[in-house]
Image: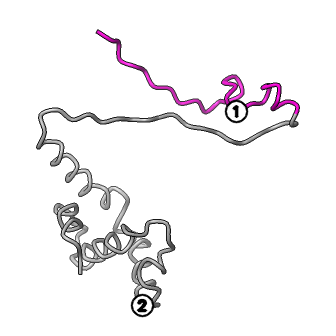
């Protein structure tokens, strides 16, 4: 049985085949309560269920945008219900890789937080305060 929240979240889903629509709803319902388990474990471990979910993800007629669009639609609908919505964004990242010797790390020459050593820095511009 598909939970009501899945049906509401995927209300605008149209993958071009009702069987694919149903499979996505089933996969979402199976994975949501246990997102860190393997696909076979999430779908019950049976061979038929496992093969069906892998066939779904290998379907050339379905791409990530097709799957994500109904969620975006549902999110926008929830936003429209409110006068003000705060959407917090965190673009910070942490890189725990260490290069060089332990001494170099201790002296911060190769420390990941040494910005001159980190070419993948992501920055965010803060709005000016009034």
Residue 130 screen position, x and y as percent: 28, 9
Sooner in the amino-acid sequence: mark 1 or mark 2: 2
Residue 51 screen position, x and y as percent: 45, 84
Q: Quadrant of residue 87?
A: top left
Q: Is residue 35 left or right of residue 6?
A: right
Label the magenta part by its dominant secondary structure. Answer: loop
Residue 42 screen position, x and y as percent: 43, 77
Give the residues drawn in magenta, as a range. 103-130
Q: In this figure, which residue is indicated by the disc labeled 1? A: 112
Whether label 1 touches label 2, CB < 8 Å: no
Q: Is residue 49 magenta?
A: no
Name the mark nearer the viewer: 1 or 2: 1
Disc 1 packing (10 Å; few <14; some 14–19; many ≥20): some
Mark 1 to mark 2 CA distance (whole Å): 46 Å
Residue located 21% across and 35% down the image: 85
Residue located 47% across and 75% down the image: 39
Q: Quadrant of residue 80?
A: top left
Q: In this figure, which residue is indicated by the disc labeled 2? A: 48
Say if 65 sits above or below 17 in the image: above
Residue located 76% across and 40% down the image: 98
Residue 126 screen position, x and y as percent: 40, 19
Q: As drawn, which residue projects farthest toward the bottom? A: 47
* Quadrant containing the N terminus in the rendered view: bottom left
Q: Quadrant of residue 12?
A: bottom left
Say if 44 sits above or below 56 in the image: below
In front: 7, or 57? Answer: 7
Query: Dot 2 lies on which element?
Result: helix
């Amino acid at each position: 049985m598909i939970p009501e929240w899945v049906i509401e979240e995927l209300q605008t889903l149209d993958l071009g085949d009702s069987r694919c629509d149903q499979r996505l709803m089933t996969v979402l319902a199976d994975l949501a309560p246990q997102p860190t388990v393997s696909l076979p474990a999430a779908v019950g471990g049976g061979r038929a269920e496992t093969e069906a979910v892998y066939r779904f993800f290998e379907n050339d007629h379905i791409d990530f945008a097709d799957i994500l669009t109904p969620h975006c639609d549902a999110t926008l609908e929830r936003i429209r219900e409110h006068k003000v919505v705060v959407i917090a964004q965190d673009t910070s990242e942490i890189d725990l890789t260490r290069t060089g010797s332990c001494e170099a790390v201790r002296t911060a020459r190769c420390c990941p937080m040494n910005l001159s050593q980190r070419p993948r820095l992501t920055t965010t511009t803060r709005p000016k305060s009034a």
